[in-house]
Amino acid sequence: MTNQTLLQQLASNPSCADDYDPNAMSVTQARQYIQQFLSPVQDSETISIKQALGRTLSTSVTSGLNVPGHDNSAMDGFAFRHAEATQPLQIVGTAFAGNPFTGELPAGGCVKIMTGAVIPSGVDTVVMQEHTATEGKMVTVLKIPAQGANIRLTGEDITIGQTVLARGHQIQPADMGLLASLGIAEIQVYRRLKVAFFSTGDELVSVGQPLQAGQIYDSNRYSLWGMLQALGVDVHDLGNVADDPDALEKTLLQAAAEHDVVITSGGVSVGEADFMKQLLAKHGQVLFWKINMKPGRPLAYGKIGQSHYFGLPGNPVSTMVTFYQFVQTALKNLMGSNTFSQPSFKVECVSAIKKAPGRTEFQRGILFKAGEDWKVKTTGEQGSGILSSMSQANCFIVLDDQTSTLAAGTLVEVQPFSGIC
């Protein structure tokens, strides 16, 4: 059975797979189901390294150079023959970075050398300047280093033919410098993933418009815009679409036809207008899940034609939590990235935490330094509509489904936003 066939069967008959319960889906199970339906983009393009930040390599990069390209000094000092270290040495010249010493080194001679300078012929050791005493043209080594000390060997960092960046690697600032150091001006990367998103709901109003009774400003589109921009995808904001079947259908189908991924917020919870559910059942293969998590219980995932679809809950915090826990990892996969895992570690929580067992919770927390140790505290009230909790936080406090109320001083798992955002 192909993954596409399984998706179609699950969408039409959820009972066709063992242990598949759309009304009680764990966070781990939902991630696993989404993962098996993903296939990275295959199209690639050539770009300059100045345009490369955040892009994903479609081809591994190998070095055409040795780095260093020659034996060179690791520090300022004197280059000499180790066997002659016990006697005063005569300075016969100076080697600079980019301007090597090319003369002959006589017996009992040494060369004053600067960091990065080519090691002169016949030399086997460098002593740092601080471990010598100089009088005129003569140098005495006060502290004899080991033979070969302070010399960086040819190819010690990178050798010719070595893979320096693997396919699927997302380019960071240090990588741009590394590529330049190898003389590489252009690289092959996967094309940008095209992602469209829109909000649903008659109560939503775009920023800049006056609010009428019962209306609220649409914050989700701006949170989604920021989260998607941070991933480096090609983002298209399709606005807020009213709860009108024709408008929703037109927007959804056009978005799916022109983009790799479509994301909506709102319209997937029990009790909401079911126009979206009807449209998704008509035009795609979409799974509707009740995730055992808080916030963010409702989640939809599937395909509309060749486009991946994610239906996120409408509450602002729920939108962001489900994006970070499910959508972001999926987008990285589709972008061709070979790094999906979100960093996490355990620290002491100085706040008491209220929680009932049965669901995984992603509470908003503030990591802070207390003396030499990192600790965490909650942002306070954790309601799914309290968007300020996400703005104040710099991490998620992750509490599994077995965890209940915790006393202050308990070790908890945290996911720092700097590692997942």
Image (cartoon, rainbow, N blue to C red):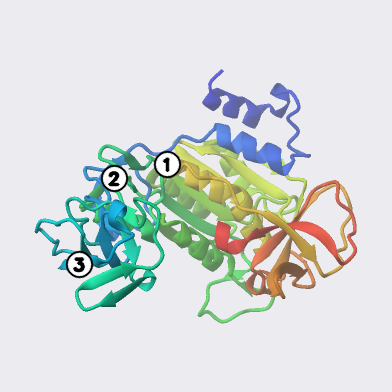
Foreground residue, 386 or 415?
415
Nearer the camera: disc 1 or disc 2: 2
Q: Residues within 10 Å of mark 2 (few under 14, many from 20)?
A: some
Q: Which of the numbered marks, if any, corresponds to residue 155? A: 2
Amino acid type of the residue that numbered disc 1 sits on in the rendered structure: Gly
Q: CA distance from mark 3 to mark 1?
A: 59 Å
Image quarter in which the C terminus is found? bottom right
**Quadrant housing residue 23:** top right
Q: Horizontally, is 169 left or right of 151 in the view?
A: right
Residue 415: x and y in percent read 66, 57
Establish if 387 lies above or below 228.
below
Q: Earlier in the sequence, mark 3 or mark 1?
A: 3
Amino acid type of the residue that numbered disc 2 sits on in the rendered structure: Gly
Image quarter in which the N terminus is found? top right
The answer to whether residue 76 of the structure is visible from this angle is no
Q: Mark 2: which secondary structure?
A: loop
Circles 3 and 1: CB distance less than 8 Å?
no
Q: CA distance from mark 1 to mark 2?
A: 30 Å
Establish if 117 lies above or below 309.
below
Q: Earlier in the sequence, mark 2 or mark 3?
A: 3
Dot 3 corresponds to which residue?
Answer: 90
Foreground residue, 207 or 128?
128
Residue lying at the far left of the rendered structure:
103
Nearer the camera: disc 2 or disc 3: 3
Q: Earlier in the sequence, mark 1 or mark 2?
A: 2
**Quadrant housing residue 373:** bottom right
Amino acid type of the residue that numbered disc 3 sits on in the rendered structure: Gln
Q: Mark 1: which secondary structure?
A: loop
Dot 1 corresponds to which residue?
Answer: 336
